[in-house]
Image (cartoon, rainbow, N blue to C red):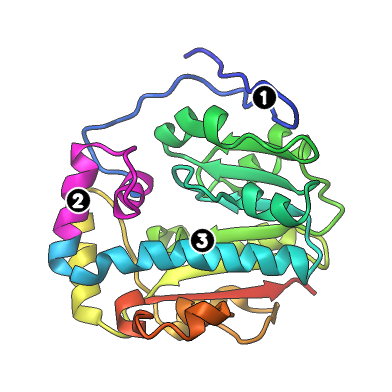
Amino acid sequence: MAKANWMGDGVANSGVHAPDLQIDRPHPARVYDYLLGGKDNYAADRAAAEAGMKANPNSLVPARQNRAFLSRAVRYLVAEAGISQFLEIGTGIPTSPNVHEIAQDSNPRARVVYVDNDPIVLCHARALLTSGPGGKTAYIDADLRDVDRILGSPELRGTLDMSRPVALMLIAVLHFIPDGDDPYGIVERLIARLPSGSYLALSHLTGDFDPTAWAGVAAVARRSGVTIRARSHPAIERFFAGLDVIEPGVLPLPRWRPEPAEADDPERPTDTAVSVYGGVARVP
């Protein structure tokens, strides 16, 4: 496969090859894109998403609330925590505003490394993950489970200063990691390589509010070869073990630092409809 080069100011060379899109089976990034109203998905992804929505009619809500949470978390990290470096693993198909767009709106020098293992995300990297001239972005084609590959990659080392605080973004990705792949160990290994003053921003699907519906969605996904592991609030809080959790804690997404208009919105979705917890924590 031919190498894809990223050209222009503040953009790193990915050093990766033209991908096999594997369009005959669904991929979480493309299903997520469909749920967000995107066009970068295929028949298998749409079929999986529609089946999931039959099992749980609220399936559209978590994807959209995750995007809103991502925006609020990044703005908090830049404006209040002073973070200028981000590592987002499981970035998905680029959907504006992306992390670098949100961060660079407040700090034009912000730097972001994106990581995903979906070949269609790689196809869009050049067009949609282009940094402003004052900052820098890079993309790594890797699986969340491959911590050493991610943290040892030249793309990361050429973009982020790992001696300075980094915000690790794990947004709506860990519920695709089964217990047998040790998701807690993965997060611990990532955090262990970050300097003091770094942050973890995380969101995760839960079955706490509607276990039957989300069990149905998980069953649909399983038939398509995709694992979805909805976890309880205590299990999700465990990802933050040893970290200083930022107020207001690990909550259903709309309740984590909502904008005034969001807090007062009478149409704000219920905890049951959202069924995703989110939180941000500081590395001591």
Amino acid type, label 1 = Asn
Q: Can you give x and y, in whole percent of width and height, for residue 27 in the image?
A: 32, 44
Q: What secondary structure predominates along the stretch shown in magenta?
A: helix
Is 233 within the magenta?
A: no
Give the left or right position of residue 146, taking residue 196 as reference: left
Q: Quadrant of residue 166?
A: bottom right
Give the magenta-colored segment's residue range: 29-52
Query: Of the residues under marks 2 and 1, which one precedes in the sequence?
Result: 1
Q: Is residue 183 left or right of residue 23?
A: right
Establish if 83 lies above or below 211.
Answer: above
Q: Which residue is mark 1?
A: 13
Q: Earlier in the sequence, mark 2 or mark 3?
A: 2
Q: Mark 2 touching mark 3, by CB under 8 A?
A: no
Q: Secondary structure at mark 1?
A: loop
* Residue of label 2: 48
The residue at the far right in this view is 163
